[in-house]
Amino acid sequence: MTENRYIYAFDEGRGDMRDLLGGKGAGLAEMTRAGFPVPEGFTITTRACRAYFSAGASWPEGLLDQLSEALGRLEEKTGLRLGDPSRPLLVSVRSGAVFSMPGMMDTILNLGLNDVTVEGLARLTGQDRFAWDCYRRLIQMYGDVVLGVPHHAFERVIEEQKRKRGVRLDTELTADDWRAVTEAFKDLVLAKTKRPFPQDPREQLEGAVRAVFESWNNQRAVVYRRIHNIPEDLGTAVNVQRMVFGNLGEDSGTGVVFTRNPSTGEKVLYGEFLVNAQGEDVVAGIRTPSPISALREVMPEVYDQLAGVARKLEEHYRDMQDIEFTVERGKLFILQTRAAKRTAQAAVKVAADLVKEGKIDRKEAVRRISPDSLQQLLHRRIDSSAELDLLAKGLPASPGAASGKVVFDADEADRLGSGGEAVILVRPETTPEDIHGIVAAQGVLTSRGGMTSHAAVVARGMGKPCVCGCESIRIDLQKKEFVTEGGRVVREGDVISIDGATGRVYAGAVPLVDPELSPEFRELLQWADEMRRLRVLANADNPEDAAKARSFGAEGIGLCRTEHMFLGPERVPVVRRMILAEDGEERRKALEELLPLQREDFRGILKAMEGLPVTVRLLDPPLHEFLPNPEELVVEVTLLRERGADPQQLREKETMLRKVRALYEANPMLGHRGCRLGITFPEIYRMQVRALYEAAAQLVREGVDARPEVMIPLVGHRKELEILRRLVEEEARKVLEAFGVELPVRVGTMIEVPRAALTAEEIAREADFFSFGTNDLTQMTFGFSRDDAEGKFLHHYVQGGVLEADPFVTLDEGGVGRLIRWAVEEGRRVRPSLKIGICGEHGGDPRSIAFCHEQGLDYVSCSPYRVPVARLAAAQAVRE
Amino acid sequence: MTENRYIYAFDEGRGDMRDLLGGKGAGLAEMTRAGFPVPEGFTITTRACRAYFSAGASWPEGLLDQLSEALGRLEEKTGLRLGDPSRPLLVSVRSGAVFSMPGMMDTILNLGLNDVTVEGLARLTGQDRFAWDCYRRLIQMYGDVVLGVPHHAFERVIEEQKRKRGVRLDTELTADDWRAVTEAFKDLVLAKTKRPFPQDPREQLEGAVRAVFESWNNQRAVVYRRIHNIPEDLGTAVNVQRMVFGNLGEDSGTGVVFTRNPSTGEKVLYGEFLVNAQGEDVVAGIRTPSPISALREVMPEVYDQLAGVARKLEEHYRDMQDIEFTVERGKLFILQTRAAKRTAQAAVKVAADLVKEGKIDRKEAVRRISPDSLQQLLHRRIDSSAELDLLAKGLPASPGAASGKVVFDADEADRLGSGGEAVILVRPETTPEDIHGIVAAQGVLTSRGGMTSHAAVVARGMGKPCVCGCESIRIDLQKKEFVTEGGRVVREGDVISIDGATGRVYAGAVPLVDPELSPEFRELLQWADEMRRLRVLANADNPEDAAKARSFGAEGIGLCRTEHMFLGPERVPVVRRMILAEDGEERRKALEELLPLQREDFRGILKAMEGLPVTVRLLDPPLHEFLPNPEELVVEVTLLRERGADPQQLREKETMLRKVRALYEANPMLGHRGCRLGITFPEIYRMQVRALYEAAAQLVREGVDARPEVMIPLVGHRKELEILRRLVEEEARKVLEAFGVELPVRVGTMIEVPRAALTAEEIAREADFFSFGTNDLTQMTFGFSRDDAEGKFLHHYVQGGVLEADPFVTLDEGGVGRLIRWAVEEGRRVRPSLKIGICGEHGGDPRSIAFCHEQGLDYVSCSPYRVPVARLAAAQAVRE
């Protein structure tokens, strides 16, 4: 019974058996053990699910027997029996994966009803209408989920019944109506499946369990797992639980409660409640529920009991909980509890508060925050001082501001969003089928549903702004427009903005301002700093970004790109003269004009980073990037020729075109750039080094602790670095001598060409430091030109599962990571003091940061706004 | 005396001490031991040279003492004394590197003469004129080589003396003239160096030895070593040898003799002889010498003695020898012997003949041929049936035919040749200073000098056609033209052709025909086949190339590129329709039109390779390569707009431009190509696979043993191969079933993306074979776009010593090689049966082939003309 035990009753399982029982099952077991009022039931394990698939989607040996046994014990405990018309046991059958996948998989309620037991239920509850409503719901859900009868076919039957009876709402239908609907449903099932709806409750149960197993592989679930990086092979558990009913009258109801506010983290009960309703009515957002405070008025005792349970659950789990409950004729049942999804703001506040409340320690608090989510707190917000054109106001379901074109359809949102357009998905409500549209949109606006509706939960999970239940707008999906209370019409393609922190919806794009960081946020990052080993530097090319990075906690600049210093209207003409120079003299003259400009740039950056290292990368891009576009020149020359224009002007343009063409490259990314420029045009690098050290020496004289380091890009062979290192040292020493200033001259290299990584032990002999340029390293290791790949095939690759993740976002450990590992080992072997970091965009990606920590890197360098993310991720990377 | 022994007398050394004594020193020692008539002397070792440089270009401890001792013993043996006017010892001081570097380093003759000993020499020989001529030669050479006085300054003094005396030739100058010249030379040395010409012979000797050491680093030598891949740190030995004189009258002389004909390999004494001359007169090509047969007439005894020595030397060394000899007053001296440089044709014939003569075995014969040189034998020759416009006839100094523009200057030849132009270098004679021009030229034509002149030796070494001693043309370097006997003027830039096998020079370019392979050549390759383990396949894309490759011994096709099958005037429009298709239907239609054409291509190739594998690579290049050039389209659209043309036509062009632009890629090499096309447009690959298997199945039905294999390009991730392997298998099986034919479906992949090599163990799970595409692998590993790199910086890198060799020619073992090693190990670990080969251009490069052998590859695949080269190189790669 150990290897092949497939079923655990709730009072047999434990909270730490999550892998086996799934999140929901483990939670139900844990709550049952702790004495919370949970309806009885049992869990069929994820192992059973995997065994089911291994057996070719058929029952693994022993499972059916164990199911009978578990059922028997459940009947014993509840005093009810499946299929017994006098005391019918009704159960829910729900999926419960190891990682929460809300709404992604299938659920069947009221299982156990048939033509006979429905009468028994009516008798027992004394509510005919309720019984027949339950039965038709079972047939509808079972028909949809297990038998594959389309959902809308059932809906049509109900519409028809309403038409016949001349009513508008479901609630206006009577017991007889539901009985008629039920009969029609059974006919529908027979017609569509050629078999009658199964009357045998045991057959119903087996069918439901199979359907839940198989829902693991439905498309929604597959997409969700891909987005959330959940492994494919875990399988789902199945929870079979006695039904309790929130729809037995005004003394019944159902709701969801958070132990704290999931938007702000404030410590107050927060949630929603619907009288006389089943749980699905809340989650699906079909009826807009009342706030939880309303429960206190209608059922004060139940409210107090719920508040007590909530407090105890939070204490038990030492985290903010999201609790589903049902009140059946005044009796409270807890159906589910789980760690509540929350905004980054709430996550930070809750974690900090839990530390203060003594419930968790600092390390735990740091571990609990998803680094990626911090980005939300660093994003800009709507400038409240701006003049705004308010369209409507809904519920503030997920904070943050977003602007974009209105789109009424998830597919369209996906299409436009994937193409790089900012869109706001506007729907009456969202369902799990809309998930790809939400992923692709900047934000979501719904006219129905509350703070715990599907749209709100999913948007918060993704850190996207969301305004829910904006009932003052009327959405017309046919016409692709919505109308505000004031009668303004907003059509597909119009731009709106939403503020998920206030629930406000504005016309047009709105101005944004920098965020202010909360004290809890700063505190949490300080705790992270105490834990981490990796240093966090920033990529910054100008004094403003350097100052911003420093304010976010950057410990220096790991990548200062100098090419941006060659741009700007007063510089480009000089740069062009430099590039197109006919001889060395002309080039030297142009470089001399650039020198003081670069020196000023460096001065500002070194000053902003006083006392911290500033790693300056010498010129990297191909020179033709600074020249006019050849196609435009071709058009100009063609027109000048055609029009017989001034021959002098034509000659000049032709000369320019010839020179631009001479610099043309078929694959500029692999062309004449980086250190190859430094070797063929050493005067450019000399000028840059001079500018840097003149700025540094001047600052040192002024008493400023300037710490320049020089980084050579695109090195692939030891000799390149050897030659350029000598050049840098020569030029820097000349300057320092002239200024009479002592400064160490530190020279390192990017490792961004595969060959550099492969020959790291040779290159390390010439380098004070390595900095992995993982953008280019990824491009060359995969043979992907990022610009070309993203539009042409990379999207297809990631969507189609050829690649698990976009390697430009998350470091490819299998390929690029192997080069990094090799380079670190070999580099340190020959030069143990070698400083090693990363300055590609991966330096700000938490998974990649964890990899960098594991490989023993010294630092990561990322964009200023990613610095807090990296500080947190670096702390989390440290394992005891 | 072991560690620091710096000097060996000729009778102390041995032939196998080449590393220590250099090639020349080892040869002299060997000959001395074997009793050949070699003038006495000693060798200062390469170790002494290295010690000299290590000591900062100063005498290492002990060397001067050892020099005194060696000199003392030489004086004892010869009965002469350095500086003794009554019995003056005169010596030559010559360099002698480990690897032969003919003419690259410096030599000083007649050392030991001064104002006193010159009189003694005159007395002893009874020849005043001779003695003063010797003395002036010493000052001239010593002044040039040791003291840095320019060569032409001395020449001017001689010209001045001739002018004074009203004579034209050196031979017309008398003893008194040479005495006057000598005095003027001494004044010149004093004026230029501020010190008198050293009268102390010992000081002369030390200066000469230092100068030879330092000549190791002169520019000519550095260039030569780079071209011939000779390591920089070997150093040179110095040979000090008693002078013998070929210029003591009509019973003296000097010459060079080959034991066989170095052009054809024919077994006859071959060489040249000058009466009353010193050796340098022959080598420098200043006087055109007589053929060696003339010696038989003027000195029959000496001739017979020489023939005997030649036979014995060849037997001793078991190889064809190149022997320098001098006859001093009827007595024969051997100054040097070495393995003779020879043409590929001669090398093959000599090796095969030596086997037949029982002197060497087959393995040795195979080892002796430089695989690269075989290329010469496979090159096309002048079509003798064509009508040719003969300009002149010279000596057939190095076989092969070449056409190109006439250039009269080595620098100009280098400039044009490096830019890709075909040039013929035309010079009165060449000197070591011209080496870069010879490298860059297609062939060399000289008006003076014989078969052993500098031009002839160097051209043969490089396998370049050369016509020498073409005395019927008059070259005017000033006017940059030459005039033929018939008065025709050929100017710089005019195209001529030379045939180095016949010595003929033609006007214009001439038609060429395929070569015929000699029986010796075929025999030698068969011996190579018995030795090698690597299989040799060919890269061929059409039936003609396949047949050619097979005739050269290819054992299959390792790379059949299919993109060429998309070209051709009738195909391009269909291909364009396929690419620009608005929907799948249109694309399918276009593909259906292409299918029968591809099928025919495959049919021809499979048939030509009956019984051997044909590895077909599916479409690789980016699709826009098949489309019109966007710049041309822009010009067309601009002009149509400007001219207000037919709006319909404009619209069509604009549409085309828009589509072409949509396919534009910033870095097409890293873009949407290779298997990425196969995954995004599977219908293209399906069509190709169908065409291939339909062709194969049809052939099998006809009784032809067709062996197709399918190769997927540009795979970087296991999943890509997995998807496409499934596609290939599906499509192939469908065809085979339809035809009712059984054929194995073998699917492999190129390894050309670094990530593929790094994740070889995953990719091997999906692959029947790996084929290293080292062109792309080199591009991506270095981050070099070959097209861009070669023009912009790669030349600079190789010339400037940043890279030792062009990595596109010789496989980069340190970087690319490391990936290959990894991929072979990991691939074989998970799939021991994995077939592994290489199909980049390196597959035809001997050094790279040796590397492939060492790594345990199964085959190399190269262009048809490289197949014999690869067969030989593969045999040589096998070590006992």
Image (cartoon, coloured by chain):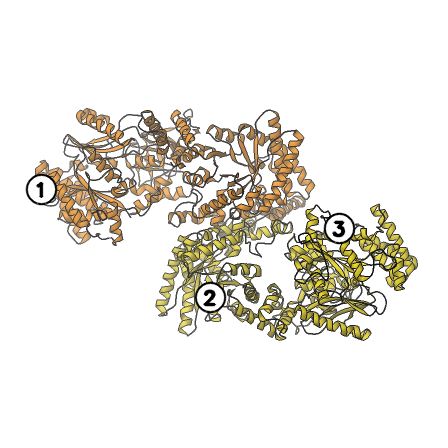
Chain colours: A orange, B yellow
The C terminus of chain A, quarter of image: top left
Q: What is the x, y in percent for residue A666?
A: 55, 50
Q: Amino acid at mark 2?
A: Val
**Subunit under mark 2:** B
Pick the residue in front: B792 or A879: A879
Q: Secondary structure at mark 3?
A: helix
**Residue A3 at x, y = what percent?**
23, 48
In the picture, measured across the screen, residue A352 lies left or right of residue A622, that is: left
The chain carrying label 1 is A
- Estimate the x, y position of residue B788 in percent, counting from the top left: 58, 51
Q: Amino acid at mark 1?
A: Glu
Look at the image and tell me whether residue B739 can be seen. yes
Q: Give the answer, above or below, for where A134 lies relative to B788.
A: above
Q: Residue at x 57, y 61 (%)?
A: B846
How far apart are the alpha carbons under marks 2 and 1?
A: 76 Å
Quick one: A256 or B639, which is closer to the camera? A256
As shown in the figure, which amino acid type bears the numbered disc 3?
Answer: Leu
Please, what secondary structure does the residue beneath circle 2 have? Answer: strand
Q: Residue at x 47, y 67 (%)?
A: B601
Whole-percent x, y for residue A191 in the image:
17, 52
Q: Nearer the viewer, mark 2 or mark 3?
A: 3
Position above or below: A623 against B175? above
Q: Which residue is mark 2?
A: B614
* Residue B64 circle label: 3
| B160 left or right, relative to B236 | right
Q: Which residue is mark 1?
A: A119
Front one among A752 and A299: A752
The tag earlier along the polypeptide, 2 or 3, is: 3
